[in-house]
Image: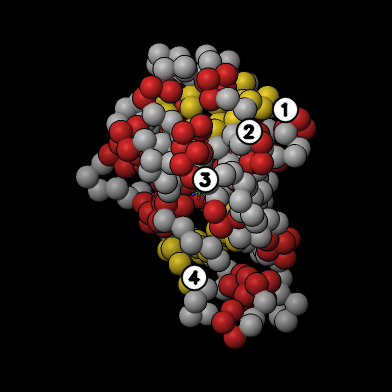
Amino acid sequence: MLGKDLLGIEDLERPEIERILETAQRMTEIGTRDVKKVPTLRGRTVVNLFFEPSTRTQTSFEIAGKRLAADVVNFSTAGSSLSKKESILDTAKTLDAMDPDCVVVRHKVAGVPKRIADVLEAPVINAGDGAHEHPSQALLDMLTVFQQKDRLDGLTVAIIGDIAHSRVARSNIYGFGKMGAEVRIAGPPTMLPADVETLGVKAYCSLREVLDGADVVMALRIQRERLEGACFPSVREYAATFGLDRAKLRYAKDDAIVMHPGPVNRGVELSHDLADHRPSVILDQVRNGVALRMALLYLISGRPRTRAESPQE
Ligand code: ASP
């Protein structure tokens, strides 16, 4: 059940996803208490190693760790020896020598969390690597959908926007697919991944088609930081073609829900109205992010660890 690290949804089996979601569902109750703290991870240390900006993910890993009574250290790359050109692996090994029980890594380059995990004794959780994977986001998305629909199996999930540059899309495609949902994608052709067929999803070029019969509509942010050239003529045209508003949402099922991993470009991927009101569940996603990350920290850093002997001893 769950390996040392959590690097991507691609590596997980369905029972592992189910176990994480069940644990997270139990964790949601702690967030409703007056005193939102349990002693489960007392004496454990979680290091947040974020090399790329983050609001939701970093804060929720921190809150999650604190709710479980772990000591949480937010490593700031700005004031560190990285600015003295220490390599990422040396930085990670240095932190590992301080015996953390979990290291949460975000980096703009795909594969960096894996490289770090390969040399670290501590378990590593990937908090987003380039356009590769963002497993905790997909898990909190699945938890949110499960709470709304009571199932994942048999649902139709439409993911819209910049799929090619989105780690959220990739993780959700794996995740919802493994849980028995039908995943469809749509976006400008330049924003659809080249390996779309191998991902087992059907790609559409029109919003009307992709939304037809959809239970879940997930809009994605245009990843300007990862776009190498113009992938679409203009933001205005993108919003007109793929931006979601209440009128276009009518193509989906009557009880469809709207999701977005954030941050939202208001008026581009989603109208202001949809960003703020039902059937949007964006703030449920954020709230569930804490419970889901509590579950991950509990399942991954709460295990007894046998530490290898240091060669210097
Ligand atoms: N917050 C998500 C991520 O880090 C989605 C986004 O930035 O568009 O990938």
Cα separation, mark 4 vs mark 3, equals 38 Å
First in residue order: circle 2 vs circle 4: 4
Q: Position of residue 305 (x, y in %)?
A: 62, 57
Whether label 1 touches label 2, CB < 8 Å: yes
Whether label 4 touches label 1, CB < 8 Å: no
Mark 1: which amino acid? Gly
- Does dot 1 land on a helix, a strand or a loop? loop
Cα separation, mark 4 vs mark 1, equals 38 Å
What residue is rendered at 72% in x and 61% in y? 115
| Residue corresponding to mark 1 | 200
Cα separation, mark 2 vs mark 4, equals 31 Å
Mark 4 surroundings: few (<14), some (14-19) or many (≥20) residues within 10 A = some
Q: Position of residue 233 (x, y in %)?
A: 57, 44
Image disc number at residue 173: 2
Cα separation, mark 1 vs mark 2, equals 8 Å
Image disc number at residue 75: 4
- Spot the residue most to the left: 34
In the image, which is nearer the foreground, mark 2 or mark 4?
Answer: 2
Cα separation, mark 3 vs mark 2, equals 27 Å
Picture quadrant of residue 114: bottom right
- Does dot 2 land on a helix, a strand or a loop? helix
| Residue corresponding to mark 3 | 234
Picture quadrant of residue 271: top left
